[in-house]
Amino acid sequence: MRKSDYKVALIVPVYNEHETVETFVKTVFEKLEAEIEHIEIVFIDDGSKDDTVQIIENIQKEYGNISLIKLSRNFGKEAAMSAALDLVQADAIVPIDVDLQDPPELVLDFIKIWREDGVDNVFGIREDRSKDTNTKRVSSEGFYYVFNKLSGRVQIPSNVGDFRLIDRKIIDILKTLKERNRFMKALYAWPGFTSKGVGYKRPERVAGNTKWNYWKLWNFALDGIFAFSSLPLRVWSYLGGFIGVLSLIYMFWNLIKTLVLGNSTPGYTTLICVILFLGAVQLIGIGVLGEYMGRLTEEVKGRPVYVASKITGPLSKQLPKGMSNTCVGISYNEETKK
Ligand code: UDP
Ligand code: MG
């Protein structure tokens, strides 16, 4: 085993993953344990309804460096990752999927770039997406294009997921961010510092099924865009202004026409078109307001991002002060109130 003075934690959100957990742990240790002296796996059970938790607890008996943060229900992958970022103390954290779609051996390349080149945010770039459907590829490209056009200063490279290595200084900054809508992909980029991408081929899931469908992906995309841009909100004044000017011109044109040629009262079609068009534009505008209002309400309510009901393994011995290992409610970055 190579000697090293740093500690790396793989953070692995799991939701109904009884088919993949064991293979994941075996593969990780096979590929990484000989190379990294201090490595730990932290599973975050995101309210699985199958026996994922029991399987993890059995594996924990075999290995000394596996921890489990059990959330009290399904909070979503972003919340699960936030729980780990709050609680794990390692020098670098690697968010990684349990289905082996993020190849564990790539972590060695991440670490090399982190240690030798001093890069703080080393991310994986999915180079080959031939396994994805055309619809998924096109919609994903479209999302990154729109996101980067709207978000201004926080840019996210396309084909980059959560799989990456982040240095402690970025984690410490992420922990101070108070927002509840946690679009992690862009939040990782928000603190800045140095970043570098490493290309890889994304294989298919080893077992089980994806937890995403198009409706969820659509909402996820909206979360990202509305969290990082206020342009959709502001564009309506400009659109209103533009339509207003056009209407004025049209009004003058009609006025002159009526003065010169008299009023023959046609125009039913024009009228109905204008009413329907403006009605639709107004409804879209209200809809966008609603999207922001809904998210604003979530933020104002200030509920915790996740609730951890149980923490086991080495992590339970190094929890922040005041937090027990059977917490009833953790709001991120706050001490547990029993
Ligand atoms: N996941 C989670 N909570 C959820 C949905 C997914 O923790 O509500 C986890 C899941 O167990 C997996 C990772 O997030 O480890 C990625 O999920 P998936 O493979 O379904 O996503 P895809 O690779 O298809 O984008
Ligand atoms: Mg997957």
Image (cartoon, grey):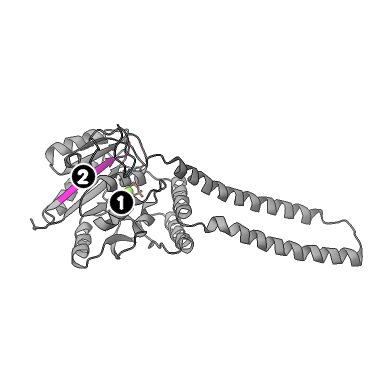
Work out whether 269 lies above or below 152: above
Which residue corresponds to mark 1?
204
Q: On the image, which quarter does residue 135 sit in?
A: bottom left
The main secondary structure of the magenta stretch is: strand
2 vs 1, front mark: 2
In this view of the protein, which residue sits in the foreground, 301 or 7?
301
Work out whether 286 lies above or below 75: below
The CB of the residue at mark 2 lies under 8 Å from ligand 1: no
Q: Which mark is residue 23?
A: 2
Q: Label 1 sits on what residue type? A: Glu
Q: On the image, which quarter does residue 77 sit in?
A: top left
In this view of the protein, which residue sits in the foreground, 230 or 96?
230
- Residue 46 highlighted magenta (yes or no): yes
| Residue 206 visible to an observer of this rendering | no
Residue at the image position 36 percent from the left and 47 percent from the top: 78
Q: Position of residue 233 (x, y in %)?
A: 55, 55
Q: Position of residue 254 (x, y in %)?
A: 83, 63
Q: Earlier in the sequence, mark 2 or mark 1?
A: 2
Residue at the image position 16 percent from the left and 51 percent from the top: 39
What span is in magenta? 39-47
Q: Tell me the quarter of the image containing the C terminus.
A: top left
Q: For the residue labelled by badge 2, is the local secondary structure a helix, a strand or a loop?
A: helix
